[in-house]
Image (cartoon, grey):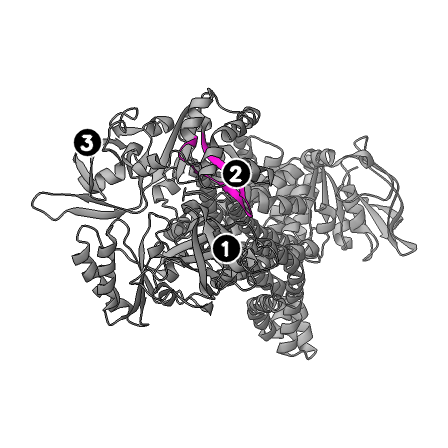
Amino acid sequence: MLSHHLLLALRNLRRRAFFSVVNITGLGVGLATCWLIGLYVWHEKSFDRFFPHADRICAVALDLKMGEEEGKTTNTPPPLGPRLAADFPEIELAARTFYLQESNVRLEKPGQAPLSFAETGAYAADTSFLELFDFPMLEGDPATALDHSRNLVLSENAAQKYFGKNSAIGQTLLINDRPFTVSGVAKQLPAASTVQFDFLVPMADFKVVERFSWSWIWLQVDTWVRLRETPTPASLAALEGKFPAMVRKHAPAAFERIGQNFEEQLRKGDRWNVQLLPLPSLHLDHPNLSSRLSTLGDGTQVMMFGIIGLLILILASMNFMNLTTARASTRAREVGVRKALGSDRGTLVGQFLTESILYSSLGMVLATVLAGVSLPLFNQLTGQELGISQLFALQNLGLAAGLTVLTGLLGGLYPAFFLSKFQSGKVLKTNVGSIKGGHAGIRNGLVVFQFSATIALMLCSWMVLRQLEFAQKSSPGLNREHVLILPVLRNLENPTEVESFRQQISQLPEVSTVSRATFLPSLGSFGDFYEPEQGDQNHAVTSNLLLSSYLGDTRLVPALGLDIIAGRNFQDDTGLADSCSVILNEAAVRAIGWENPIGKWLRYPGNQNQRFQVVGIMRDFHLGSVRTAIEPAAIFHHSSNTYKVYASYLAVRMHPGTEKTCIEKTGKLWATAIPNAPFQYDFLDESFARIYRSEAKMGAVLSVFTGLALFIGCLGLFALAVFTAEQRTKEIGVRKVLGASVASVTALLARDFIKLVVIAIFIASPVAYHFMHKWLSNFAYHVDIQPWMFVLAGSAAIVIAFLTVSFQSIKAALANPVQSLRNE
Amino acid sequence: MIELKNIERYYPTGAVKTYVLRYINAHIAEGEFVSIMGPSGSGKSTLLHILGMLDEPTDGEYWFLGEGVHKFNERRRTEMYREYIGFVFQAYHLIDDLTVYENLETPLMYKKVPSGERKSRIADILDRFNMVAKKDLFPNQLSGGQQQLVGIARALIGRPKLILADEPTGNLQSPQAKEIMEIFRTLNKEDGVTIIQVTHSEENARYGNRILHLKDGRVENEELIKNGASS
């Protein structure tokens, strides 16, 4: 029976070649999309599961509230890890890592130029780190590889990069000019690993962590623990319940050192809670975690992609459903005959399902080709590195087979039951052909659904793109363009060397200003608490305030194009005129509550109550993402020496249009000033754009999805138009004989479809509004949803739908009525 | 074989019922060859569809081989099609996507006849209808008469006890029509198959042993044919 069904389906497919091509193309596109998205979702869900003890490993996180600031972070202070391991028997191991920022790694080769790269994957780690994760090693012993000073564990990739096929063990690499000896090589970690590293060196070699071993405020390390037993939610909660006592015992002393009363802060509503985040759910379940772990994913986004992928597949299945039920009149007779010949309903359902699964299988064949071809584009969209071989890995083929059957059932079930329901008596009346197209209502419903989904997607992706453009381009108070950024940290540690390098660059004709600063907007800042003084003001100001700050020179303001709206910029770089000056932004002034800020004073408890006088107010600008509100920010002068941070940049403002030559010349200066490190540079606007990688990804993916949905929807609409025109040939002929014009016939045929699209617009608009509104609320600053967007998107949909159906309608309207009437 | 008691078929049109069939009482014994005649709209086809269980009476009782058809569910009806009833249609109703051979095979597959036997039965019937050379052609490659031959062959291949034919020669030229009617007569006389046909043609009707004249949904009169089939 099955072979009979298949044979019949194949003949049917060939005989109705046009509809078959439409169906298979739609299904192929839908399946390819769904397949690729399935792989992406799978990848995201599989994060960290490969670790043998994944279920016992937890990232240590802090749930903090300090004054107005609150949030959850995996940035932890140095003493926390050792404390946890010492105080709680439930915890088997604890290990910390300290990110070394961008580091220069160099392999000296006798008689040759050294091999040198700027590396971003270097970490200092506790000796227990490798053991805790049980990283598979190619060479070396995970238990001891980090035990000795100046040891170095490489990733497989790094070992290959520097040593090729030779064994790396015992070799020496210079990291920021300090020699380390390779003691182990870790097997390449899968892409689906939260923890990624290329270079691991012993924590003990980085004194800075040791220096802050007292501090519960210096959140510069990541801490991991491995529990003795796999935790249940209850046991985890019980363990976490014991942490506050530990914190209250050890943290207050550290807070006292910076002039804060920990207990009193807690009484005021602050929080300082230690939490454990189990590794298997770490990747997707904590979207708002502030973290140095750059691999963290976004569960909502993954889910959204999954849903949209499925939606596309459903849209494609609907084309199939639509065209099959539209052809019901031609199939009805066959059903009637078969029933009279003794077929039961089950067999008929089987026959129609076989047919639909045949279509979805052919769609899958097409999808395989499409998926293979579009894989590079897909990788680019999702930031993955899937290979063809992974696409066709066994489990993925299983996914593909599952999708094929699912699609076949999705598209086939309704027509199968609908068609098999026909009563022989009704359809076999001698004058056949009088059967109506069948279930026009449902078919219209499907078209409305398809276009609603497409229009909603259209609106959402447009919104995301607009917001993205806003986020990347809108930059009040800061001129992001034409600013070259040179990281000089570590490359030039001596301030006088930095200064002479700065002066060399500033003498280039292409350069207007060069400034030296600790951090720059979009690249982080130093945050700490300051206490504003009341001054001559009557009403009270806030007692303390978290300020994000940069240390800069007089040229920072012009180099970044900052806008001083009151007071003045720093005046002088040579003397100490501005060592006690501060420039605040408007947000800081608002938060403090000063009416006349110029001349007022701030105290810095973090550095012996050093006092700063406000000399200028700068217009608010985004320090980072537009997701968060603009924070209180400040610029202090280098000469204040108020704090030390591990960052140093030169910001070079170039004359517009000279970027290329400027980079060339700067590169040459770099090569002589910093011969040991490769030339590195960045642009301020690009650095800002990178903050919105996730949004850019979403915008790109949504646009692609919208295009696909539109394509599938139009394909279906086109086929339906062809079909309707075919069905109404006689009516059109009669109308033309009666004197109808081509235009009126076209309008007659197109009107029905346009009506459906209009209904779809009314359904899609509120849905899209809801999602856009929800998404935009993630941003403190965002574009507004405008009514004209709905009008424009709706008009676009109507125009596209009209063009799709009018081609066929005009063709039908132009046909000679004599022919159509004779055929009947 | 067939017992009709007060069969009625009507459609509600607004407040009034439009009767297609009224007070139909009939008895048809096994081995009969009955023709149903009447003007357009007299309810011939509806009656035939009811006899063929393709349509249901609104009222009345229909007994087939001693069983009450009005109590049948779809499954039981399907069994009837498989075991006892063969249909011949005016418009032939062959399945366009299947070859002659496959059209003939379809009812056997539904009857779950094993493939070896299917082959031999099809070979037999093709031989009997002189259509061996046409077995791989599709319906649209055949003339109307040839298509109807396939339709009859298809109705016969399941070895039914009853053949219901709805204007089997309605679309055919008269020489072809005569050929078809001869086949019916042979089937009835030699194979003992009960045949009920709806026809417009007096000539064709006379091949049977009895004519039911329908008018306005009622049996107007019954006519026995002397030289017709044996009863």
* As drawn, A260 above or below B93: above
Specify whether disc 1 shares its chain with disc 2: yes
Q: Please rate how many residues cluster around mark 2, counting C-alpha atoms within 10 Å: few if below 14, some from 14 to 19, many from 20.
A: some
Q: In this view, does B115 lie to the left or right of A743?
A: left
The reply to whether residue A355 is visible in this rendering is: no
User: In what quadrant of the picture does the N terminus of chain B appear?
Assistant: top right
Label pair 1/2, CB-CB below 8 angstroms: no
User: In what quadrant of the picture does the C terminus of chain B appear?
Assistant: top right
Magenta span: A58-80
> Does residue A63 show up magenta in the picture?
yes
The reply to whether residue A273 is visible in this rendering is: yes
C-alpha span from label 1 to label 2: 24 Å
- The residue that label 1 is drawn on is A631
- The residue that label 3 is drawn on is A169
Q: What residue type is labelled 3?
A: Ile
- The residue that label 2 is drawn on is A261
Along the viewing direction, whichever of A310 and B61 lies nearer the viewer: A310
Image x and y of residue A282, in percent? 47, 36
Label pair 3/2, CB-CB below 8 angstroms: no
Whichever of callouts 1 and 2 sits on the residue coming sooner in the sequence is: 2
Whichever of callouts 3 and 2 sits on the residue coming sooner in the sequence is: 3
Q: Please rate how many residues cluster around mark 1, counting C-alpha atoms within 10 Å: few if below 14, some from 14 to 19, many from 20.
A: many
